[in-house]
Amino acid sequence: MRMLHTMLRVGNLDLSLKFYCEVLGMTLLRRKDYPEGEFTLAFVGYGDEADHTVIELTHNWGTSSYDIGTGYGHIALGVEDIYSTCAMIQARGGKVTRQPGPMKHGSTVIAFVEDPDGYKVELIQIAKASLGTQPATVAVSQ
């Protein structure tokens, strides 16, 4: 078994795709409208779904926002240089809600950004060798 994707319900698919693709550097892997069900699914990620876990953005037509809830945690992405990544995200219009620095009660350097729906995206500074061959840039949290 392996993890395939994490699904997030989004209020504005175009804004969410802009954030995940243009701000965080993911690629839109596939998108499909389901007119009978009145929803659209868009899958984004840093590599092909055959080899990578991706994010499924679900847009239910006619729904512009959701309550995120208190039980949702986050999706984390490793980054090689958290400071330059945060600067790049801000330059692309992204909102950094926690500047890079050591996590509370620890030494791991983390940061958080926020997507258009209010989901937090966690960045974790990790060694380049730990990232594998695919570039990574970010994570999602509440």
Image (spheres, rainbow, N blue to C red):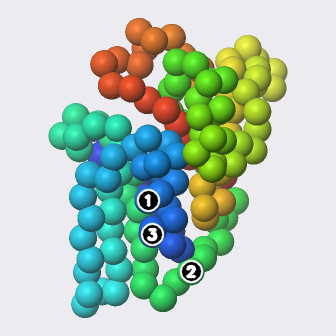
Residue 90 pos. (x, y %): 66, 41
Relative to 99, is 75 on the left or the right?
left
Residue 24 pos. (x, y %): 50, 42
Callout 2 amino acid:
Ser
Callout 3 amino acid:
Leu
Q: Quadrant of residue 101?
A: top right
Looking at this view, is 2 or 27 the one in front?
A: 27
Q: Are marks 2 and 3 in contact (CB under 8 Å)?
A: no
The answer to whether residue 4 is above or below residue 123 is: below
Relative to 60, is 79 on the left or the right?
right
Instruction: Give the label, 2 or 1, closer to the camera.
Output: 1
Residue 50 pos. (x, y %): 18, 40
Of callouts 2 and 3, the N-terminal one: 3
Residue at image mark 1: 17
- Secondary structure, mark 1, is helix
Mark 2 and mark 1: Cα distance apart in space: 15 Å
Residue at image mark 3: 13
Q: Quadrant of residue 43?
A: bottom left
Residue at image mark 2: 64
Give the quarter of the figure containing the N terminus.
top left
Callout 1 amino acid:
Leu
- Secondary structure, mark 3, is helix
Mark 2 and mark 3: Cα distance apart in space: 9 Å
The residue that appears at 54% across and 40% down in the rendered structure is 139
